[in-house]
Amino acid sequence: MTTPETGSALDPAELAKTYAEIAQRSSQLLSAFIARQGAGSVPAFGDELGIAKAFYEMMGKLLADPAKFAEMQFKLWQDYLSLWQHSMLRFLGHDARPVIEPASSDRRFRHDDWQQNFLFDFIKQSYLIAAKHLHQTVGSVQGLDDQTAKKVDFYTRQYIDALSPSNFLMTNPEVLRETVNSGGQNLVKGLNNLLRDLERGNGKQLRVKMTDPSAFEVGGNIAVTPGKVVFQNDLIQLLQYAPLTQEVYKRPLLILPPWINKFYILDMRENNSFVRWSTAQGHTVFVVSWINPDVAHAQKTFDDYLLEGPLAALDAIEKATGEREVNAIGFCLGGTLLAAALAYMAAKRDNRIKSATFFASMIDFAEPGELEVFVDEKQVSNLEKKMQERGYLEGSEMANTFNMLRANDLIWSFVVNNYLLGKQPFPFDLLYWNSDSTRMPAAMHSFYLRNMYINNLLRQPGGITLNGVPIDLSKVKNPLYFVSTIEDHIAPWQSTYAGARLFPGKVRFVLGGSGHIAGIINPPGANKYGYWTKDKLDEMPQEWLAGATQHPGSWWNDWAQWVEPYAGDKIAPREPGKGKLKALEDAPGLYVKMRLDER
């Protein structure tokens, strides 16, 4: 057997092996499905997310204004007429300016045939025109409440992204070429990949594989900065890293990562590890590694995360080093917890944190960005019912939510690569970390969603109470450093800016380039993205940005200069496990290696 274009022979043995794997996987999945149905498992279809209700309301208001609807239709047909004229000119050999072009950041249409081939150029532009007008039509509907309008906008984009011609065999030129060149073997391999991913989801959901998990090992080729676990309780392991300098600053540095992800995003590789870089600047670095909770942690509360997280870590650091005062960093949710901890400590007259830094951390949740679509009373109530049954929120559910925020990059690109092109995903450490999801304890996560996202109580003096103490951010007088990123879709910088303005003390706000992860994990050696600074915190974020100064390179250097006055004198380096706290095991420790399943 040979391919039509190249004449190269396909390997019959390899093809037979693939067919056998497909048959075996299909049989197992079918048997599992029949067993579930025999056990009386009938899926219940409802509108738990409120999507149908939102679109029903939108359509009612749209059709109530037929003149507006007709105007939208007329504009659509005008663009299609322009496209037809453009296409005829190209067909006749004339140069013609495209009616519409994809955004420069859109990777779906980068194959040459999307521009050079007459048919695929027409398909691409036809799709982009339809997408533009569909989005504009639903966005123009008046009279919807803010939550419904955002839900309609978000799921319209999900629908538009799903119907992209790049996602289908017959309308993707790259897939068609591969199908011809391989004699269709790419589709056979793609089917095998699809069945494999269904198996990973136990036949209940599709778990699209993003990277090669066998290429990475936590503590093997990622999270390898030398250190020790020096403390452990039900929720955290505390890691102390070995010194890399002849002298170190007197005050240690405590880092609180988010518990929604694993901490090693801060310690991926030697050349982009914030942990290693900070250690090389002379800081004695301690990092909290949160446990991956299960049903045994169902009743762990936000209070517990405060007491057994940062406060327990402060006690342990004092035992390990003899130093009472520290500088602290909170990343994302870790920053939200750090803000609450600072207010708690202020009420207790506990001044152990000398300065605090917030990486892309939301404190004021008035404008939480696109995640707001998933957080309303109905959805949270349904989520609480699920969590009460299991004791936790499944990590894959949270991961799917975040992936939907960038569906073209984090869902559909892998559908095309894995199932249509029949390729294996590229080994990429960041995507390995992204797929290494964690659970959320039911009690803690419910408190977080209701008090932060729905009711936005953290910003209100006494709005929430932790361990019997009313939390009042206005009592926090510590010097603070906020860094956010201009393209962040998880913690929009305008929202983090609003959080920075809640504190009465000395606050520095810095805006980095790129997004939630790449903009934060931006080592100086990469010399990428740049950042903006301004000494004054204006009332409005856009006013601040308009007057800010842009700098090349990484904000890490700016932070290093800012934190140095609070780091203390230089002293002899401290070795992990040599103080009153003995080493329990090597970094990165057991907790971070707890996976939900094999990916």
Image (tube, helix red, strand yellow):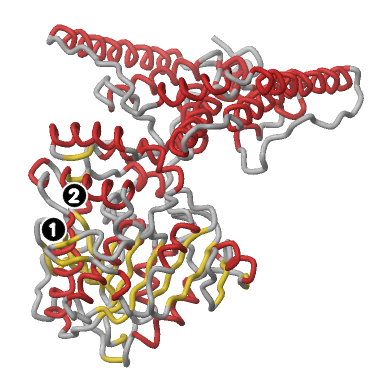
Q: Secondary structure at mark 2?
A: helix
Q: Is residue 515 above or below residue 402?
A: below
What is the distance, in whole Å, between disc 2 and disc 1 at their CAs? 8 Å
- The amino acid type of the residue labelled 2 equals Met
Q: Rate crowding at label 2 as few (under 14), some (14 to 19) or many (20 or more) other CA atoms within 10 Å.
A: some
Above or below residue 6? Residue 469 is below
Residue 481 in percent (x, y) is at 42, 73
User: Toward the viewer: 546 or 21?
Assistant: 546
Residue 254 % position (x, y): 27, 72
The answer to whether residue 111 shows anywhere in this view is yes
Residue drawn at the location 12% of the way across and 63% of the way down: 467
- Residues at circles 2 and 1 in contact by the CB criterion of under 8 Å: yes
Query: Of marks 2 and 1, which one's residue comes earlier in the chain?
Result: 1
Q: Which quarter of the figure is the C terminus placed in?
A: top left
Measured as percent of width and height from the top left, residue 204 is found at 27, 21
Q: Is 76 displayed left or right of 469 in the figure?
A: right
Asked where in the image residue 37 lies, by quadrant, the reply is top left
SS category of the residue bearing label 1: helix
Residue annotated with mark 2: 444
> Which residue corresponds to the image point at 51% horizontal and 73% vertical from the top-left?
537
The residue type indicated by label 1 comes to Asp
* Image quarter of the N terminus: top right
Considering depth in this image, is 444 or 252 the residue closer to the camera? Answer: 444
Residue 41, disc: none
Location of residue 423 with respect to 233 vertically, above or below: above
Q: Quadrant of residue 160?
A: top right
Of 167 and 501, the residue lying toward us: 501
Q: Residue at x 76, y 19 (%)?
A: 80
Q: Which mark is residue 304?
A: 1
